[in-house]
Image (cartoon, coloured by chain):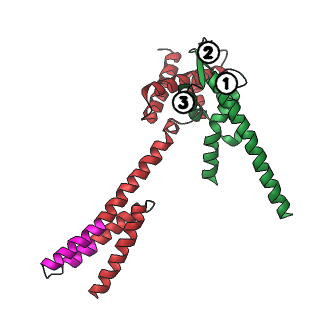
Chain colours: A green, B red
Amino acid sequence: MRSWVTQLRKGLLEFCVLNVLSTGESYGYQLVRRLEMLEELAITESTVYPILNRLRKDGYVKVRLAGSASGPPRRYFSLTALGSRRVREMKAYWDDLCVSVGRLRRKEEEGDS
Amino acid sequence: MNTETHVERGVRDFLDRVAEHLGAVPEDEKREILTDLASHIHEALASRVSEREPTLADLEQVLAEMDPPESYAPQGDVEGAAGSDRRTIGIAALCTSLGSLLAAGLLAVLADTRLPFFLLVVGQVAALGLGILSRSSPFGKAAIITSSALLVLSVLFAV
């Protein structure tokens, strides 16, 4: 069960990061805080920063530097056109997947009763 | 030396430890991750203390709530390396088993002593040990089966 959950979390991480960024740009700390609210996914900074970096390298995310009163400049992350297209495709696939799995589970429950 | 310097040094020490664990991650990626992490720590400190300079104790609390440096080690690398080690040990186990069988066979043809028997038993015991160590690899499993079978056969033959 644990390894299944780990694999599922890993697969969903990129989707969740892109999803948050699809609502607008965000700096690292803010993004991590928002993702930490999804308690079941147990997303923390050691998983978020490497994935943000990979998404930036792959051209899905871009970075903008802006001054901050609290220390070093903030790096604001936002979606590129490619990133927006990717998150749209992911959302569509996720919706289809939820419908299909939901249908399967309903059939099983009807079979049980 | 003021408190801020201690805090900055504490941040740098933490980032150095993270850098060690990032290991094989390319340098440019490592730099980006560390920059984001430094910014994260400063934001966390600022959200904790807004009306004074953060102290070393504040930093320690912030770092205690964050993931430890070792959690930045790329997981695939660790699992991959361990898997590769087990495979190598498994191959060594299989080679020891078959090698000692071959050597004992040759020796038995050349010399009429009990040496081939001892060589075979010692070889198979060593191969069995290595096979157990690498039992999760197919080579390890094959070595366990081969060495166990040869051990049983050699004992039966000796009796």
Residue B134 vertical placement versus B155 (above, below): above
Residue contact at pointers 1 and 3, CB within 8 angstroms: no
Magenta highlight on residue B41: no
Percent x, y of residue B125? 32, 71
Labels 2, 1: front one: 1
Q: Mark 3 points at which residue?
A: A54
Answer with the quarter of the image where residue B148 lies. bottom left
Q: Of the residues shown, which amino acid type is indicated by label 3?
A: Arg
Q: Is residue A13 left or right of residue B11?
A: right
Percent x, y of residue B83? 43, 52
Residue B65 vertical placement versus B143 (above, below): above
Q: In this view, does B18 lie to the left or right of A108?
A: left
> Which of the chains bears the disc numbered 2?
A
Labels 2, 3: front one: 3
Quarter of the image containing the C terminus of chain A?
bottom right
Q: Could you tell me which secondary element the residue under label 1 belongs to?
A: helix
Q: Give the range drawn in magenta.
A: B96-122
Q: Name the residue under label 2.
A: A70
Calculate the distance from the C-alpha at mark 2 to the C-alpha at mark 3: 26 Å
Seen as rendered, the residue at the extreme bottom is B159
